[in-house]
Amino acid sequence: MYQRILVANRGEIALRIIRACKELGVETVAIFSEGDRGARYLDLADEAYCVGPAKASDSYLKIANVISAAEVGNVQAIHPGYGFLAENAHFNEICRSCKIDFIGPSPEAMARLGDKNAARELARETNVPVVPGSDGIISTEEEALRFAHDVGFPVLIKAVAGGGGRGMRVASNDLALKSALQQARAEAEAAFGNGDVYLEKYIEHPRHVEVQVLADNHGNVVHLWERDCSVQRRHQKLIEESPSTSISPETRSAMCDAARRLIQTANYTNAATVEFIVDKTGNFYFIEVNARIQVEHPVTEMVTGIDLIKSQIRVAAGERLPWSQTDIPQRGAAIECRINAENPRRNFQPSPGKIEQLIAPGGFGVRFDSHAHSGYVVPPYYDSMIGKLIVHQATRADAIAAMQRALSELHVAGIETTVPIHQEILSHSAFVEGRIDTTFVERTLLAE
């Protein structure tokens, strides 16, 4: 096991990693920007170093500064969390060249699966169903139009790099496709430094279901069942749950096996999430692999009883996975609500500022993962998530009731949050009955 790990992230996920390391007896080195100076969670690390100004590109994304902090802190490994440098194969390679372990896949596996087009090709080779898409990157409007006319509108434009809904557009006719192509390229270039895009046939009213996978360095690969992430706004997840209400036991088994098979074929190690969409008839299609831990990993932890962050660290340190596939349960039902500092009634406008008072909910089966506290100032420079509220109960109906109760107890004064929209979603008959898809929020709640 490692003696010291650098946490190359901030906020909630940095705190989550620090806590896991403490329980493993591993010392931690935190990094922070000037925008996060004085954050209370930094006191829980054994050391903390400033890596630059508030702007992420000058601090958390500054590879030289992060590596310098790792060398000064004398660490053996770096945990990247999610976002920032978590899926940067170049950073991964630099860590390796500096004799520092990267807690994640190899640079080669990350590059192979991080490029969505290459991942689709690997999926085809592994007999994993793939949404009909373009043969590689779309370079011209003519290529895009030819593909759209072959498969039929609507089509989905997707950035080869990145995620989070950036560089993604839906087009329903020729004119819209030309305009959306330019917008998607520009947005992808600005967000990821790579404006390449490809096209897929757009599956209307799909469910978004993903499978958590863990793989060690000894050839062992297991899945930890699925999470349903269909409640979204503009391709950004709001609520996640496990198990999914949209798939049959047969589909669940086939999807989870497909995810495990793909990760094994890619010679991938550590944690990965394989994402699928499910159409109205129950067919599932591979869309991408997230080569990192996910924001919604607590949902899986609750239904399996497996600590994913500790598992990542142990695997990176060379340990074998201690379970076979039949050892991993899927018990009860778990739901996670992302609590963002946003005003959902003003088009989810960010709401940075000082939290005058924060009272976290509790009770049986309730978990609140957050770095925020009374007096904490939410900075305007980063993602607006201030916490994740998770519940785990015996049944989905019980989980919904527990989440409604927990949301009513969660008190955040001084800023706006997404709590009201979560309460609306959880009380909506379509959600309660499991009749949701990725357009549910926009079609119903935001359209009213």
Image (cartoon, helix red, strand yellow):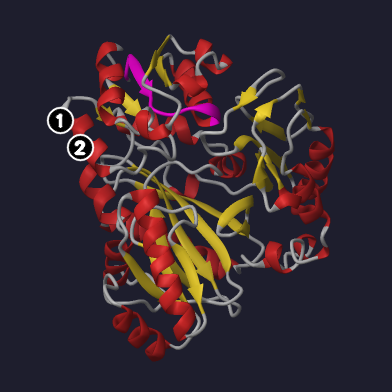
Which element carries disc 1, helix, strand or loop? helix
- Tag 2 secondary structure: helix
Region of the chain picked out in magenta, as a range:
2-12
Decide whether residue 10 is among the magenta residues.
yes
375 vs 216, nearest the viewer: 375
Q: Can you say whether 157 is above or below 392 in the image?
A: below
Residue density around tag 1, few if under 14, some if 14–19, many if 20 or more, within 10 Å = few
User: In which quarter of the view is residue 435 placed?
Assistant: bottom right
Query: Which quarter of the figure is the C terminus placed in?
Result: bottom right
Would you call the spot at circle 2 few (<14 residues within 10 Å), some (14-19), or many (20 or more)?
Answer: some
Q: Report the amino acid beneath label 1.
A: Ser
Q: Specify the label residue 93 is tagged with.
A: 2
Place of residue 157 in the rendered image (x, y in percent of width and height, measured from the top left): 42, 70
**Quadrant of the image containing the N terminus:** top left
Instruction: Report the residue at 44% width, 39% height from top.
Output: 82
The vertical placement of 432 against 130, above or below, is above
The residue beneath circle 1 is 97
What residue do we see at 65% from left, 21% from top? 376
> Foreground residue, 212 or 163?
163
Would you say 220 lies left or right of 82 here? left
The x, y position of residue 236, in whole percent, is: 56, 54
> Can residue 94 be spotted in the picture?
yes
